[in-house]
Structures are given as C-alpha cells and as structure tokens.
C-alpha cells in the first residue's frame, strides 16, 4: 500500500500585504493593454531583461529573466478582460521569496482617467517574522518603482 498522498508546494502566502496604485491620465483600456499583458511586464520593469511564456491564458507560465541573473516563474491564476483584472502565483524564484500571490487591476475614473493597482501578498524564504519589515520594504519599493514607470508611459 502506498503512503503517497496528493500534495503541493504552492500555498497562499500569509506574509506582508503590499498595494501600489497610480492614477493614470489615460482611459482604462489603454492602461490595461500594458499592465494586463502578463507577457509584457518588461515594458514597465526595467530590471527585466526578457520574459518567456509557456502556454496562453489562465494556467500559462511566465518566466521573468532579470538583468542581474535572477529568475522568477509565475502561473496566471485568473484573468478577466471585462473587469480588467488578473491574479498570479510565483512557483519558483531566486529572489528569496517563499510564497507570493499578486493581482493587477485597472479601474476607470471617468473620461481619460484610470487607476492601476498592483496588490502583492508575499512571504520571505528565510528569517520568518523578523525578516518581514525589510522584506515588505523591498516588495513595496519594487512595486512602487514599477507603477511609477507605468505612469511615465502615459504621462
């Protein structure tokens, strides 16, 4: 009799919760075309050298290659082009992140204006609760820099 049971390493994180949001002077559809492009985050994250995709749509995999040699592999969990939102989970990385779940959304704010919001919930790979404050600062800074670049694309 086998002792093997279904298991997974993918778990929803319970670490830091980071939100980065920018108000963009452009209509939501145009902003979504950039931040909603799962394969195109290198357009607003200059630290990325390139992205390789496996598959399309929900359950596709994104490999983000960083210029400094780091690698992040993520899976698209959900995508709604009507609601302008998507979620994904990190399944492998060399950045010291244990578990990471993220969401990107865009909301219209009237004629020619919208808000893009990146939400991240993540845990550091090491250090536990003591590592959380510095880790949260790192994640918040990364997200804020990326979202400032989104704003620059439409400014």
Image (cartoon, rainbow, N blue to C red):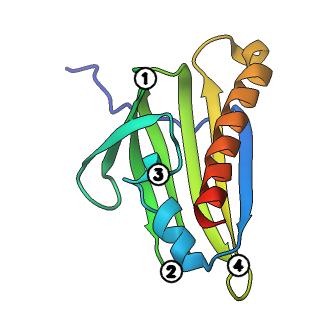
Circles 3 and 4 in contact, beta carbons < 8 Å: no
- Residue 72 visible (yes or no): yes
- The numbered mark at residue 113 is 4
State the residue position of label 3: 43
Secondary structure under the numbered disc 2 in the rendered image: loop
Figure check: 114 above or below 122: below
The residue mark sitting in front, 3 or 2, is 3
- The numbered mark at residue 82 is 2
Q: Quadrant where the C terminus lies?
A: bottom right
Q: Label 2, label 1: how many angstroms apart (C-alpha)?
A: 33 Å
Which badge, 1 or 3, comes first in the chain's sequence?
3
Figure check: 118 above or below 108: above
Q: Residue at x 61, y 66 (%)?
A: 154
Secondary structure under the numbered disc 4 in the rendered image: loop
Q: Residue at x 46, y 75 (%)?
A: 81
Which badge, 3 or 4, comes first in the chain's sequence?
3
Depth check: 6 or 9 in front? 9
State the residue position of label 1: 70
The residue mark sitting in front, 1 or 3, is 3
């Amino acid at each position: 009799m086998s002792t093997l049971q279904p298991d997974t390493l993918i778990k929803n994180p319970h670490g830091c919760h980071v939100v980065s949001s920018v108000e963009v002077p452009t209509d939501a559809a145009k902003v979504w075309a950039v931040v909603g492009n799962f394969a195109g985050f290198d357009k607003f994250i200059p630290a990325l050298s390139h992205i390789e995709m496996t598959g399309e749509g929900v359950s596709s995999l994104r490999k983000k290659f960083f210029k400094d040699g780091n690698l992040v592999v993520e899976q698209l969990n959900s995508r709604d082009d009507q609601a302008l939102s998507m979620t994904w989970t990190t399944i492998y990385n060399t950045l010291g992140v244990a578990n990471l779940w993220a969401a990107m959304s865009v909301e219209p704010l009237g004629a020619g204006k919208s808000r893009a919001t990146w939400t991240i919930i993540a845990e550091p790979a090491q250090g536990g609760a003591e590592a959380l404050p510095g880790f949260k600062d790192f994640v918040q800074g990364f997200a804020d820099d990326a979202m400032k670049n989104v704003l620059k694309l439409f400014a």
